[in-house]
Amino acid sequence: MTATSLKKEEEIMYSVIVPMYNEEEVIALCYERLCEVMKNVDAPYELIFVNDGSQDRTKSIVETLCTADHHLRIINFSRNFGHQPAITAGMEAARGEAIVVIDADLQDPPELILEMIAKWKQGYDVVYAKRRERKGESFFKKATAALFYRTLHFMTDISIPLDTGDFRLLDRKVCAALTLCKERNRFVRGLVSWVGFKQTAVEYERHERHAGQTKYSLKKMIRLSLDAITSFSNKPLILAIYLGFLLASTGFLALFYLMYLKLFTTQVIAGWTSIMSLNIIFFGVTLFMLGVIGQYIARIFDEVRERPLYIIESQRERGRYLDTQPDALVAKNEDNT
Ligand code: UDP
Ligand code: MG
């Protein structure tokens, strides 16, 4: 059965996208909790589990679930591409009128989906979940998250709501707008703010991870923060101008002072230490700014290469494998719109 004929048979109203990377400990429970919640919705739904190259038993667990439940669709990536590409793949495949993105680890309570749907029915196009409290996360995680959201707020020109993650409901038209944004270094929640539409929040308490470790290593967190800042702000580049101006003007003032001492007084200034420290400061700042510029260039390079954002290894729905050719996938998605 192709994706198109399925759509004709059953008009899907809600799609729930779950990105998963090595979530063998939680995925079965996550599925159960989602089913419990989705039983209460009034229209046909689908669950799209995006397996982002897990190396554990995640794939076999969800594939077994898929054979027994026609609501469940699975997209398997050929390797770990990351959380943001996984969400994007889910959005591109989704057939629903309202699309929810939720983490697999049950930190985002699935029950909130019903509240989100209620808001959507009131006419909102984006309903994002705002964390009132974060339980059971390390001080480091909370501190870095707080710093990240505030830096981002200061750095970027568009307003990205504070303390929100990717747990949100999007109307079909918002998803369509997002898939038009072809950038590879994606920061999806930033793009959601950027595309506009009528947005509102529902508040929730963020629980601890049900089981397992965070899949966001420090490296991935830094990468996401850099993606977020560079894709929505040129302020780091402008920093070079301010810093350069500040250092150069201080340098000139110091030079005038030293010339005055040399020409008009007998005072001798011991040179080595001050010159060395100034040199180190200037080189440090120069290298730092080269690094900042390098970040932008690397991202431009990434964009012009135009590699796909992710590669699908296999796709399953109604227990069966689907065609996985990227072109065929694109064609199917277009058919669905
Ligand atoms: N995730 C993913 N690919 C990755 C890292 C994470 O699909 O490379 C998924 C992960 O399985 C989870 C969600 O993204 O469903 C959020 O990850 P996690 O809970 O580890 O992040 P945290 O809540 O610690 O920020
Ligand atoms: Mg988590």
Image (spheres, rainbow, N blue to C red):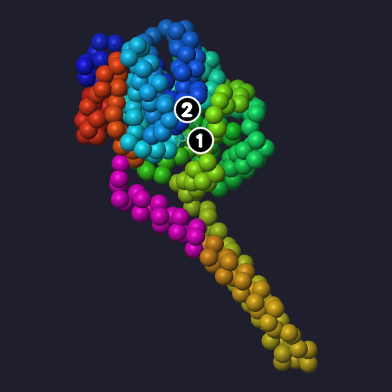
Quarter that holds the N terminus: top left
Side of 335 where 236 appears, left or right: right
Q: Tell me which amino acid carries mark 2.
A: Glu
Res 264 → quadrant: bottom right
| Circle 1 crowding by C-alpha within 10 Å: few under 14, some 14–19, many from 20 | some
Q: Nearer the viewer, residue 232 or 164?
A: 164
The kind of residue on which mark 1 rests is Lys
Decide: is 10 above or below 307.
Answer: above
* Disc 1 secondary structure class: loop
Tag 1 residue: 215
Q: Which residue is mark 2?
A: 23
State which region is magenta. 290-308
Q: Is residue 210 magenta?
A: no
Location of residue 177 with respect to 245 vertically, above or below:
above
Left or right of 106 on screen, residue 171: left
Q: State yes or no: Cβ of the residue under disc 2 lies below 8 Å from any atom of ligand 1.
A: yes
Cβ of disc 1 within 8 Å of ligand 1? yes
Circle 2 Cα neighbour tier, 10 Å, few/some/many (<14 / 14–19 / ≥20):
many
Residue at 39% over, 39% down: 81
Contact check, label 2 and label 1, Cβ < 8 Å:
yes
- Name the N-terminal-most of marks 2 and 1: 2
